[in-house]
Amino acid sequence: MSYDPENIFAKILRDEIPATKVYEDGQTLVFMDIMPRADGHCLVIPKTPCRNLLDAGADQLASVMLTTQRMARAVMAAFDAGGVTIQQFNEGPGGQEVFHLHFHVLPRHEGVALRPPGQMAEAEVIAAHAEKIRAALEDIPR
Ligand code: AMP
């Protein structure tokens, strides 16, 4: 399977469609999931093209994992969470819907289930959650 440069995350990377961005560095971008399954649900992507874990290069994997770790720490601090779930899906049968590599970062609280998929959140709520994560990131070392 080849990379489709018209996928929605590629359009976010090219600023062709809006996203609520929370962090970026030279190799990676983090933005809020528009259908958050937990408060603070965000997505980590490489800035360079690859479909998923199966075709990613070593540099893409290394940079995305480092950013994912940083975001895991940040969302736990921002939401006073007791844990964090990382999800990543590969190809349609593996549950992937957007074909640009991404890691879900989901802060978790004891006894609180993830919300069902496919439920849009209010833009103002997502913006407020993004701001909490940005503030927490200031105390997370690179
Ligand atoms: P999956 O490929 O199964 O990991 O799912 C793709 C994820 O991307 C889902 O959690 C969607 O809610 C999320 N998503 C889809 N479109 C957008 C978008 N424009 N901005 C932010 N998140 C999105």
Image (cartoon, rainbow, N blue to C red):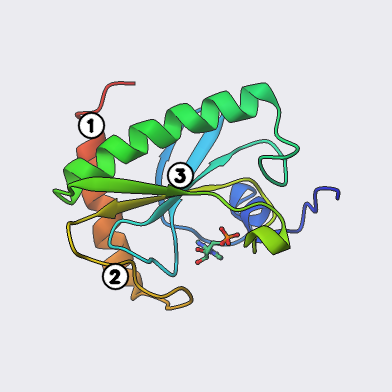
Tell me the element at label 1.
loop
**Inter-mark Cα distance, 3 to 2:** 18 Å
**Name of the residue lying farthest toward the left:** 80
Tell me the element at label 3.
strand
**Inter-mark Cα distance, 2 to 1:** 22 Å
Q: Is residue 77 above or below residue 11?
A: above
The quarter in which the C terminus is drawn is top left
Q: Residue 26: tell me if it is visible.
A: no
Q: Position of residue 122 (x, y in %)?
A: 33, 76
Q: Which residue is mark 3?
A: 30
Q: Nearer the N terminus, badge 3 or badge 2?
A: 3
| Quadrant location, ligand no. 1 | bottom right
Tell me the element at label 2.
helix
Residue in the picture at 35% in, 72% down? 115
Looking at the rendered structure, which numbered label has been put on residue 138? 1
Q: Residue 122: tell me if it is visible.
A: yes
Tell me the amino acid under the disc marked 2: Glu
Residue in the picture at 36% in, 49% down? 85
Q: Position of residue 82 (x, y in %)?
A: 17, 47
Looking at the rendered structure, which numbered label has been put on residue 72? none
Q: Which residue is mark 2?
A: 124
